[in-house]
Amino acid sequence: MRKLFTHIAAIHGIENNPQPMLKGEEMAHVNSLKNAWLLIEDGKFAGWGTMDLDPLPTADDSVSLTGLEILPGLVDSHTHCIFAEPRSAEWEMRLKGATYEEIAAAGGGILNSAAKLRSMDEEWLYEQSLWRVQRMIEHGSTTIEIKSGYGLRTESELKMLRIARRIGQNVNATIKTTFLGAHAVPPEFKGRQDDYVEHILNEMLPAVCGEGLADHMDVFCDRGFFTAEQTLRLLEAAAKLGLPAKIHANELGITGGVQVAASAGAWSADHLEHIGDEEIECLRNSEVMPVGLPGTSYFLDIPYTPAREIIGAGLPFALASDFNPGSSPVCSLQMVWSLGCSRMKMLPAEAFNAISLNAARSLRLENTTGSIAVGKQADFWTTETRNALQSVPYFFGVNHAKDVYLKGTKN
Ligand SMILES: [Zn+2]
């Protein structure tokens, strides 16, 4: 099946020579083509060119996109979009002066989410979570990673991951799952953190892998959560069971998370609001993709990941939403794109590459999505917004996506 899109005002994010990722100064460049056609064959990109080609390629179906621009599908590599309820009451507590850590210490935060999720009916949780994923897709996200971590006991973690897999079977977007049993210590293990780590190693991790429910393993390695030593143990055990590592690191302080990520061969180290020269040097000597989550910094009013230092060091850099009810209730990568520019001083092109190709790389999906390249999945979205590469992050708070195509099919 060949489908030809014609009269496209501009196509952005084209790769003639596909790269696994973009580093340093490369991130400021995006290939675009004006007055173009785009050919899709069997759900994959098959070619493009300008409208002055005569004759245009033959196809089974032809669609004119006059006045529209096209961007590749966005990749949200870090979300917690399966949750029972919003935490807007805690947000109001924070507005009155309580800190995130104080709320967590008072039984709120992740533990609040865990208590609600454990008791929630699986069908209802599925419906709620699917609704959120559909909103993300409507905003141009065509690949979405979903973490567990609000169950914090075996059956509830399995419930979350089964729901994530089921969502993956019922939407055309690409869904990847991550086991995050080490998100917090549940109340029944209070004061016995090492015992909970053993419990994850001996019971939860084998159960998750036994059902084939996770594509990666993640640990919240930070002050007040899991230590660098515990994190390394957990990630090494997961690697033996075939699960590659991702990590929450350095959100609350410099806690050795980046070094652990490098030792464990993690695919990404996410957050990194607090990093110094040692962490940058460590990243330079690794294959770990640094990932910033500006929605979290915005919503918690904490420092932003130093994108300029990371890119200035010649490193690649990705951005994700961290969509979750406590610290980043944002489902739109268009908004993340805007925050990357306005708050982290990234250029529009840099932040765009951070939510497309580099984000795909952080999931090791750079060969199948993240840009418009021959043979990649035809994941893309159209917009009526002219000069989209600048205008989408500039006009923030608006959904600029008109139609979203997943593997060549309109959502
Ligand atoms: Zn997170």
Image (spheres, grey):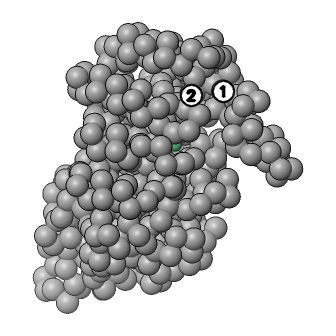
Q: Is residue 164 at least partly visible in the picture?
A: no
Q: Is residue 186 at least partly visible in the picture?
A: yes
Instruction: Tell me the residue that label 2 is attached to.
Output: 184
Q: Within 10 Å of the Cα at label 2, are there few (<14), some (14-19), or many (20+) other Cα atoms? A: many
Name which residue type carries label 1: Leu
Q: Position of residue 384 (x, y in %)?
A: 49, 76
Vertical arrangement, residue 61 with respect to residue 131, above or below: below
* Disc ID at residue 29: none
Q: Residue at x 34, y 78 (%)?
A: 28
Name which residue type carries label 2: Ala
Q: Residue at x 80, y 45 (%)?
A: 98
**Farthest residue, direction bottom:** 52
Q: Within 10 Å of the Cα at label 1, are there few (<14), some (14-19), or many (20+) other Cα atoms? A: many
Helix, strand or loop under label 2: loop
Q: Of residues 397 and 103, which is closer to you in this image?
A: 103
* In-image side of 167 versus 377 (left or right): right
Instruction: Check contact, mark 2 vs mark 1: CB within 8 A.
Output: yes
Q: Position of residue 266 (x, y in %)?
A: 30, 41
Q: Earlier in the sequence, mark 2 or mark 1?
A: 1
Question: Residue 224 falls in which quadrant of the image?
Answer: top right
Q: Of residues 203 and 306, which is closer to you in this image?
A: 306
Instruction: Tell me the residue that label 1 is attached to.
Output: 111
Vertical arrangement, residue 55 with respect to residue 355, above or below: below
Q: Residue at x 25, y 47 (%)?
A: 364
**Farthest residue, direction right:** 96
Q: Residue at x 44, y 23 (%)?
A: 162
